[in-house]
Amino acid sequence: MNLSKKTKQIILGVVLLAVITVGIIGLRLSDNRNKDVQKVEKTAAVNTDDKPFYYVEKKLYEENSRPEKVAFYFVNYKGNTAKAIETENGMKLVNMKNMKNIADVPHEVIVNGTGYWIDEDSHFVTVDYNKEKKAVLVRTFDKGGKEIEEPVALKEFGGRINDDSYINVMEFRIDTKYIYLVSAANPRPILQIFNKDGSLHKNYADIDSFEIDNKGSIYITFGVSDKHKYSGFEKINVESGKVEYSVETKIFPNYIRYNKEKDTVYVMDNNGVTRYNASDGKNEKNIFTFGKDSTYVLDSIYPRDFFVGNEEDLYIALFYFEGDKYISLYYGYEPKEGTRPERTVTLTVTAPYRQDFLSDAITRYEMKYPDQKVKYDYKYNSEEEFVANTEQYGQQLSLSILGGDVGDVVMTGGSGLNYEEVFKTDAFMDLSSLIEKDKNYDVLNKDVIEGLRIKGAVRGLPISIRRSYYEVNTKLLNSMGVKLDYNNLSWKDVISLTKVIEEKAPDAHVFTGNEYVGDYLIPMIGANMSQLVDFENKKINLNQKWFVDLLKDLKAAVKSENFVKTHTGSDVIDKLQGSLFVRRSTERRYYDDMVGRYLNYNKDEENESLYIPIFVGEKSNKRGVQVNNMYSINNKSKNKEDAWKFLSFLLEDDIQKLRTLRAEPVNTKANKEILEAAAEEFSKTYGDDALKVVDMMMNIFDRTDYVDVYYDKQDIYDPLMSYINDEMSLEDALKKAEENVWIRLNE
């Protein structure tokens, strides 16, 4: 489907709204508000009159939407929750409860409206920009399409008029006295309230969602700003502009809706839907939770609207992008009295801490396999808490593994566990044959898989990896007359550039980074490890002339003022900061960051850079990656088949592309598609320069030779660091490092 320019710009406006609604940008209301307002405490009493209930989900329909035709609103039509949808016989108003047609949508509404509403008399009301009259017009039609009132021109319209042709309508409402319109504006959407003659009554800047109660009040959502220390919503008297109450919500509210029969306000955020008493703003009940009451969570799927019926039946409109297609999804939720039946646990996953990726994956797994129930057994609630206790947890996990006191699936990579040693035992299954027979095998990074083979067995399945790479300042290189072979650039080559910079660019540095020497010594050890230690035959030789000379060169270089420039506040704009190299990582970065950061730096004619692979060793050009998200199957598990079913699910394209993975997927197909999608988006602004990033990054992604194990490097690193710091002679440091490695090899 090829989208028109108008459609794309409307979609862009919708996307902007969606991005904003997940809380990235706070809201600021206009000065129309009364600052002396009582804040309603969010700890208000729960409505004990409610009977317990849970929701049963039903997917109503899916469509490739045409945003320029009809807005996405749910409406109340003669007591029915309704939505205008496109059918073979034209646009129909459909009862969302049973998906039956209840009225034709007049052709004039489709043609003339970028926003529509149905008033209390069941008339269709539209709003759109009229190019000929150069005015935003509100028009009213009966169900037969006859215009029954004179068009109303909105005076002092404050929204953005695109290409002198159309406006982006976010939300639109009509009551007996006012016209309410949220439209795209610069830089943020604006809510305007107009009198019925089109004159402006009030402006509210930076608004995304609002609701009316047809009783003289309006409800407006807001986020943290200079006017508000918290996110929430307010009830405002439309006539006077006085704030009747202000409610703090836990997180930023996406949408707010009012139910007349119950005199209730419903607020949707990225967690779910909460009900409030409309009269006083008291929190009554959290009625809906994404991922618990739904088969999806909000990550690459965005909410567009929702509606709560009189029986607390719930309807949610969502959208997502699939290439150039804009896909709309509509779900209905029927309340069932009682508590949700619990499913029997079929699988237990043991992990150190709760991570968003695994939570998202489990939700989707249980959606795909309704007979499966996964228990997520984690010790810490956050990664930060785990990091502070990594060593302790790793030791405890080792003991639990020996005792068999772990789940069916165990997170072994990124858990503080010395998995290399554990994988020498049969505590976990050999996954080799299962991986090779898996439907995802052809697209997996096999170098990483094979890099985990120990004693002929692969006992850990990597889900994601962390890969280092560098950005090189080619402009600085050229100014010094230096040519480098980026694909075979060794640590010795890099260290030697210190003297070149001292002579030819004394204000520059080799690296922008940390002064911590380990940032350079550790990867240098890793690059040369294969020539220093023979793990298979348990041999070690660090006292080789080439390695001794390399250590001496590094020690001399780090004492130079031109070796490293520490990060400053300006690294937000320019992390190179005039240096030759800055290290990047695929960990915790989504690829739009990679693409955007490169393009933003190189858009300045004064800057030229490239992304290049990590540096190689002196005797080997092999490059390693680190596994940061890896899972194993407990050999004592009675659910090995289900355990592999779950791990195989984690390898699928859609799961590997989840933003919550926050690292490089082991699925190479998914990895490339993420990068290409990011480049395609940036190409709208930067053209072919964005696509250049794909080639650079694929060159980096294609260079994996082994899995880099932290513990092996640590044995060597500690003594050599003592040498760099003048705390130990080089001879003694090498001897101590060899002893450390020998002990580990013979444990």
Image: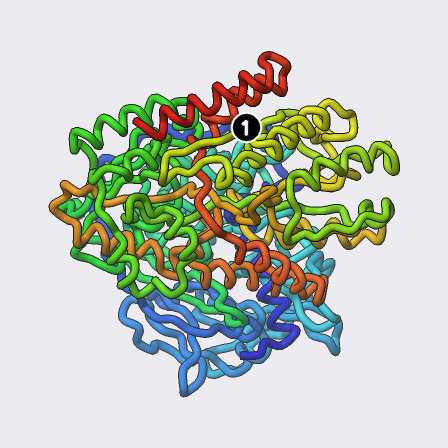
Residue 365 sits above or below residue 325 on the image: above
Toward which corner of the image does residue 194 lie, by quadrant? bottom right
Instruction: Give x and y (percent) for residue 710.
Output: 45, 33
Does residue 138 appear in this view? Answer: yes
Q: Quadrant of the C terminus?
A: top left
Closest to the observer, 19 or 500: 500
Give the number of callouts.
1
Toward which corner of the image does residue 99 lie, by quadrant? bottom left
Does residue 519 appear in this view? Answer: no
Closest to the observer, 161 or 212: 161
Residue 76 sits above or below residue 647 on the image: below
Q: Is residue 608 left or right of residue 275?
A: right
Closest to the observer, 583 or 1: 583
At a point 50% along the width and 52% down the height, the residue shown is: 704
At a point 32% along the width and 44% down the height, the residue shown is: 454
The amino acid type, in three-letter code, at marker 1 is Asn
Instruction: Give x and y (percent) for residue 413.
Output: 37, 39
Instruction: Give x and y (percent) for residue 622.
Output: 53, 49
At a point 81% along the width and 51% down the height, the residue shown is: 604
Q: Is residue 264 left or right of residue 97?
A: right
User: 10 Å neighbourhood of mark 1: few (<14), some, or many (≥20)?
Assistant: some
Instruction: Give x and y (percent) for residue 573.
Output: 73, 41
The type of colouring in the image is rainbow
Q: Is residue 104 left or right of residue 226?
A: left
At a point 25% along the width and 36% down the height, the residue shown is: 377
For the view shown, which residue lies furthest in the top direction?
727
Q: Which residue is mark 1?
A: 543
Mark 1: which secondary structure? loop
